[in-house]
Image (spheres, rainbow, N blue to C red):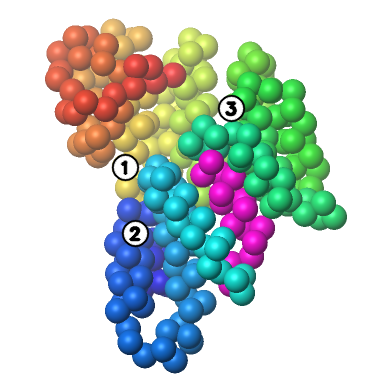
Amino acid sequence: LYRLAYAYFEFQKPRESIPLLQKLLDIYQSHTDEDWRRRNRKTLVKAQFLLAKSYYRKRRYDEALALIQKLLNQDTKHFVALEFKFYALGKILAALNREEEALRYLKQALDPQHPQPYVLDQTGRVYHQLGDYPEALQQYSRALKIRKLPFIFANRAETYLAIDKIGLAVRDLHQALKRDRKGKHKIYLRLGQINLNGGKLIEAFHYFQSAIRYKQKVYGADYAEAHYALVFYHLQNDQQDLARREMQTALEITPNLEWDTSLREVLGMQPVDENYSESYF
């Protein structure tokens, strides 16, 4: 069960991981053989940690936080290294908009002798949330000097966009695209959004199509967010029918997709639930 859940998680499918891990925990808790429980304690801890990460991926932050806090108290043998627990806690607290607490735990996760680039990257993201863009850029630069990982380039691009340095953002996204093997579809989507906002419609269409093709090829799944982005492309080309078709496709893939309420009148459609985003780009 643990290995199957881990495989789903690595394949970007935390929704499938969660019930498997919950079943694993039920099996462990209901088992009466203390020797068996002792032998499988490490798997239990690893499963709890993976479940917390799966909750985080599904934005179930309160449940993720409770699990990590439980592990900090109970995993006295550190089957999961303390730095990983502090790092996970920092990410969760940042998602809950508790940035100052997040920074404290990320500082504890950071090895001063051998700084981990992923910790520096997350620290940069927290400073970005706080609006301290110079400090965020400094953290990303430190991380990239250690290792040029694609997600660091992608996150730095968001900070460049926040301070209106579009060229630097695009450059970083292309650097990320060269190095990424799992998330190219997200980078293609972001490049498409930037080009669409800049009025470069042909380039935007190319990137949105590339995002869809990549996700279908690698994950065997369609990409709702890219179809949603194509809605705005078609609207700028006065192609309401095609925009409506892309919106319907996006909602078929992800029925609870967050979408701009102003599109209802433009497309002549009704929302499928109450959870919408007031703005997409």
Q: Secondary structure at mark 3?
A: helix
- Residue at image mark 3: 129
Image position of 188 (left or right of 31): right
Depth check: 109 or 137 in front? Answer: 109
Q: Which residues are magenta?
A: 79-93
Residue under the image location 47 percent in, 76 percent down: 43
Q: Amino acid at mark 2?
A: Ile
Report the residue that reaches farthest toward the front: 73
C-beta proximity under 8 Å, tags 3 and 1 = no
Instruction: Please count the marks in the image.
Output: 3
Question: Is 238 situated above or below 56?
Answer: above
Establish if 133 lies above or below 187: above
Say few, some or many: other residues with alpha carbon within 10 Å of mark 3 (under 14 / 14 to 19 / 20 or more). some
Residue type, label 1: Asp
Mark 2 to mark 1 CA distance (whole Å): 22 Å
Question: Quick one: label 2 or label 3, which is nearer the N terminus?
Answer: 2
Callout 2 secondary element: helix
Q: What residue is shown with label 1?
A: 222
Q: 6 or 54: nearer the eye? A: 54
Q: State the residue position of label 2.
A: 18
Q: Which residue corresponds to the image point at 25% horizontal and 39% vertical from the top-left?
A: 253
Q: Are discs 2 and 1 less than 8 Å apart at CB?
A: no
Q: Tell me the amino acid under the disc marked 3.
A: Gln
Do we see residue 12 in this rendering?
no
For the residues marked 2 and 3, what is the alpha-carbon distance in whole angstroms?
A: 28 Å
